[in-house]
Image (cartoon, helix red, strand yellow):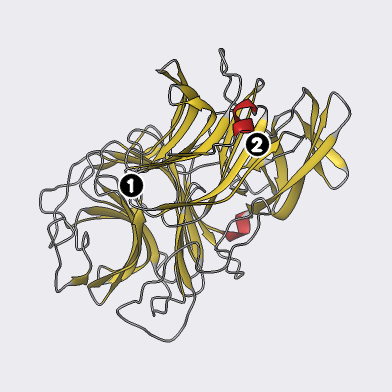
């Protein structure tokens, strides 16, 4: 822990504490604020291994948890961390993710200096650190994307102004498209048209001061919907393939979800960093299980798959894209037990790890997973809070259907997010050809290419190009 020691800083209060964090390991990073001494302060900790974000008040040595939620950070990537604290509450954002807030402390501390926190992490950097007094600052956050499933040309997208900073009471929150107010209130649902659009948040405080923020929205039209399933029927639209050694699998439709309820698993390679195989390049690969393939779609090229997944175990979950056969496809994998997220290319049966980063997930909690295959490489997104990028990857797998692959997982249910009503359909959307690796959102400063990820040289190169991005 590194605490700023200026004599005047002990009297600081009602401020905004900003920094850019870059964790290179999977342990704890964070910050302290309103620091008087080790027994009196606030502590924010973000732990990748436990997949937990926690805000704690320490007073007279006693620790009180004010807020806690599932979530972590992006491994080996720069992220904007902001903490706004006053007697009106505590607002914490990591990029565009709001920590369970604003958090109201019923017995708030009075003030103090700031510091940065690194616990059991091999390397973490903190840059662009600043502390400023609070002024009215509108902040609009939202889902950003949706699919027009019913074909009426519009879809509701939930937005919130909960991250707005104001030193005094807010008089009004207005949401505008152009000059027209389309919604009011801190939280709203914007009736967005198909295609790209923008919504502006206008916040006015009780003194008449005004601040604005803007986010981009994107609604995919029904005409681009290649596949959708509300999981109200049977498994007739899927082909079930078991390649695990301790099957069979147990795929079924239950509670409006596609459920796999067997602990099927196995593989040609034992887990562990020293486990290498001539059938693949890397550790934690060459593993088997069961997968549910969508029938048809062999000629699909540019598309996105979006689902909500609820794991009830800590093993590996995968989504397959550009699946030609069991010898040719991509795997986007999340493994809580190993603490990994990775993209794997399977080509002529040989497995190559294209991208890998530390990542965990919360059991029995729904997580949104979006995988995009556009141009040459696929793009994977989970939530919007972390990413792993391999620029310039070249390969030859350009088409194929998609499937859900589940490894060594005792129970998992698969659903599709539908605006503010998760769990309605699984969807596959046709790409628009614009190479949309990053979904619409707030306009943030751009960082130099290469500082948000790391390059890995693929084992095989073919004509073509693009990038592989896993946003988790």
Q: Which residue is mark 2?
A: 16
The answer to whether residue 397 is left or right of residue 247 is: right
Image mark for residue 369: none
Report x, y in % for residue 455: 41, 71
Report x, y in % for residue 247: 13, 48
Quadrant in the picture for residue 1? top left
Question: In the image shown, does 316 or 361 lie closer to the viewer?
Answer: 361
The answer to whether residue 170 is left or right of residue 298 is: right
Report x, y in % for residue 252: 29, 41
Quadrant in the picture for residue 291? bottom left
Quadrant in the picture for residue 321? bottom left
Q: Residue shown at 32%/35% (left/top)?
A: 363
Instruction: Please name which of the two marks, 2 or 1, marks the residue nearer to the observer.
Output: 2
Residue 410, relative to residue 269: is it above or below?
above
Label 2: which secondary element: strand
Residue density around tag 1, few if under 14, some if 14–19, many if 20 or more, within 10 Å: some
Farthest residue toward the top? 107
Label 1: which secondary element: loop
Q: Residue shown at 77%/24% (left/top)?
A: 168
Residue 329, relative to residue 256: is it above or below?
below
Question: In the image shown, does 271 or 205 lie closer to the viewer?
Answer: 205
Q: Which residue is mark 1?
A: 235
């Amino acid at each position: 822990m590194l605490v700023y020691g200026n004599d005047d800083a002990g009297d600081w209060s009602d401020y905004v504490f900003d920094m850019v964090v870059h964790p290179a390991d999977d342990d704890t990073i964070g910050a302290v604020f309103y620091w008087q001494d080790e027994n009196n302060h606030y502590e924010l900790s973000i732990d990748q291994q436990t997949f937990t974000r926690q805000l704690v008040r320490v007073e007279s040595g006693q620790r009180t948890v004010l807020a806690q939620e599932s979530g972590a950070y992006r491994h080996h990537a720069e992220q904007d961390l902001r903490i706004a604290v006053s007697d009106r509450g505590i607002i914490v954002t990591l990029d565009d993710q709001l920590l369970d807030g604003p958090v109201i402390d019923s017995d708030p501390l009075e003030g103090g200096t700031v510091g940065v926190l690194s616990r059991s992490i091999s390397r973490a950097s903190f840059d662009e650190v600043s502390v400023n007094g609070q002024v009215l600052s509108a902040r609009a956050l939202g889902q950003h994307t949706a699919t027009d499933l019913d074909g009426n040309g519009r879809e509701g997208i939930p937005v919130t102004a909960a991250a707005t900073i104001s030193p005094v009471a807010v008089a009004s929150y207005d949401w505008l498209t152009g000059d027209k107010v389309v919604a009011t209130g801190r939280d709203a649902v914007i009736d967005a048209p198909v295609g790209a659009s923008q919504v502006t948040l206008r916040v006015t405080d009780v003194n008449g001061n005004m601040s604005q923020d803007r986010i981009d929205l994107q609604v995919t039209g029904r005409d681009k919907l290649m596949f959708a399933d509300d999981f109200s029927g049977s498994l007739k639209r899927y082909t079930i393939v078991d390649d695990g050694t301790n099957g069979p699998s147990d795929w079924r439709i239950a509670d409006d979800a596609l459920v796999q309820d067997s602990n099927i698993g196995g593989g040609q390679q034992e887990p562990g960093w020293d486990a290498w195989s001539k059938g693949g390049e890397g550790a934690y690969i060459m593993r088997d299980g069961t997968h549910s393939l969508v029938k048809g779609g062999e000629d699909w090229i540019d598309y996105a798959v979006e689902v909500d997944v609820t794991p009830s175990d800590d093993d590996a979950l995968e989504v397959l894209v550009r699946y030609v056969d069991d010898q040719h496809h991509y795997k986007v994998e999340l493994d809580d037990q190993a603490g990994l997220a990775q993209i794997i290319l399977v080509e002529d049966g040989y497995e190559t790890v294209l991208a890998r980063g530390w990542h965990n997930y919360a059991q029995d909690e729904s997580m949104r997973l979006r995988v995009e295959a556009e141009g040459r490489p696929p793009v994977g997104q989970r939530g919007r809070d972390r990413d792993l990028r391999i620029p310039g990857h070249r390969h030859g797998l350009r088409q194929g259907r998609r499937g859900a692959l589940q490894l060594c997982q005792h129970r998992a249910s698969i659903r599709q997010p539908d605006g503010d009503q998760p769990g309605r359909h699984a969807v596959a959307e046709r790409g628009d050809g614009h190479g949309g690796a990053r979904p619409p959102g707030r306009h943030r400063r751009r960082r130099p290419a290469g500082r948000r990820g790391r390059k890995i040289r693929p084992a095989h190169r073919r004509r073509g190009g693009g990038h592989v991005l896993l946003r988790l």
